[in-house]
Amino acid sequence: MTQQHTATTAVRQGIETDLQHRAVVPPIYLSSNYSFADPQTPGAFDYSRSANPTREQLAIALAEMESGHSGVITASGMAAVHLAVSVLSAEELLLVPHDCYGGSLRLFQHLARKGQFRLQVVDMTDTEALTQALAASPGLIWLETPSNPLLRIVDIAAICQQAKQQGCRVAVDNTFLTPVLQQPLLLGADMVIHSTTKYINGHSDVIGGAVIAKTPELSEELLWNANTLGLSGGALDAYLTLRGLRTLSLRMSQHQHNASLIVAALQAHPAVSHIYYPGLVQHPGHGIAQRQQRGFGGMISFELQGGAASTGRFVAALKLFSLAESLGGVESLVAVPASMTHRAMTPEQRRCAGISDGLIRLSVGIEHSDDLLADIQQALTAVTQGDDAS
Ligand code: PLP
């Protein structure tokens, strides 16, 4: 049989596996512990920090969707990031992009200061800088593509090929696209990381994460580390996340559809000075995105003429985009990364990463496109009217 589509795996995982009552949907196991047949004979599960049947269902689904060996479900995306870098030892070098999620960068810097590994920050879209950094034989390269919030794209397959020549492992944060739109393990990566808080759960009601490994050896190391460090996620969160995952494919289609229409509206408006969206031919990563992704996703960043002052007016005028951090839920959100999602970075780090104070990031939801477009138009009108009045 040919490999199942990710949409089918998401819907079918665990269905009709309950032998006790023949429940169609797999039941939730909240129990923290499981009885032993005798002191020497545990069952398949003994203690839920190590393994839990509900968490396992979600892990199997995500591992299959990412074409990995197996997955570890964690209590948050940050726990997943922490788990992924826990494979490094003190003398090893971690190479990270200068514009990765601010919380990830904060953790990397904190752990490096504590001596858990050595750290080098590099602009991964700069091929020469990357080649130079790779010459130092890092233990792990961290990729985030598209990056948060500027949606920069790097070539996963090309970087993995270079990394392999240096014996270096590659981890990809796939939060923005999910396995529906991008499968880094098939492009040569060793680990995929998700904040499942975002698109995978998709309903903005769970904090969670996952690390999916390509090989049995790496899977075993990650499971051991997750259990030892206590990073595993809760059963109720896993249950809700698996329920969200069932509709991921449909949701991603609608997120993308709405995002492409909003991008067209932004392009046509004179108040908009710059749009960051990999679906645009003028985006520097457009060609790579076309090759390695199955769509351009539902995230858009842009800047307005007049900078931060215009941003304030635009954000205040929006009615259907909630001013909130996070992304990937069914509801549309707007964020100003400099003062919200990326405030953990210093102003110098933000400047280096190209994140201006007025940058606006939209997480386009799955509401009807007519309503979202009308809201964007009226908020842009509010910006231009404000300009006229000043
Ligand atoms: N990775 C990316 C790309 C993110 O955007 C985030 C959070 O915004 C995280 C990781 C961390 O995830 P969490 O907030 O679930 O801990």
Image: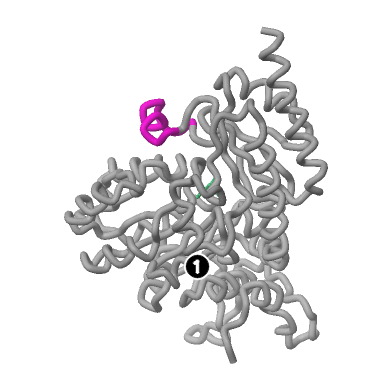
Say if 347 sits above or below 33 in the image.
Answer: above
Q: Quadrant of the N terminus?
A: bottom right
Q: Identify which residue is drawn at 36% across, 47% down.
A: 97
Q: Is residue 293 magenta?
A: no
Residue 330 locus on image (x, y percent): 73, 51
- Please give left or right for residue 200 compared with residue 138 in the image: right
Observer able to see residue 223: no
Q: Which residues are magenta?
A: 343-354
Q: Identify which residue is drawn at 73% across, 88% down.
A: 19
Q: Quadrant of the C terminus?
A: top right
Residue density around tag 1, few if under 14, some if 14–19, many if 20 or more, within 10 Å: many
Say if 340 sits above or below 131 in the image.
Answer: above
Which residue is the site of mark 1?
A: 183
Residue furthest out toward the bottom: 1
Residue 27 locus on image (x, y percent): 74, 74
- Nearest the viewer among 283 and 18 is 283
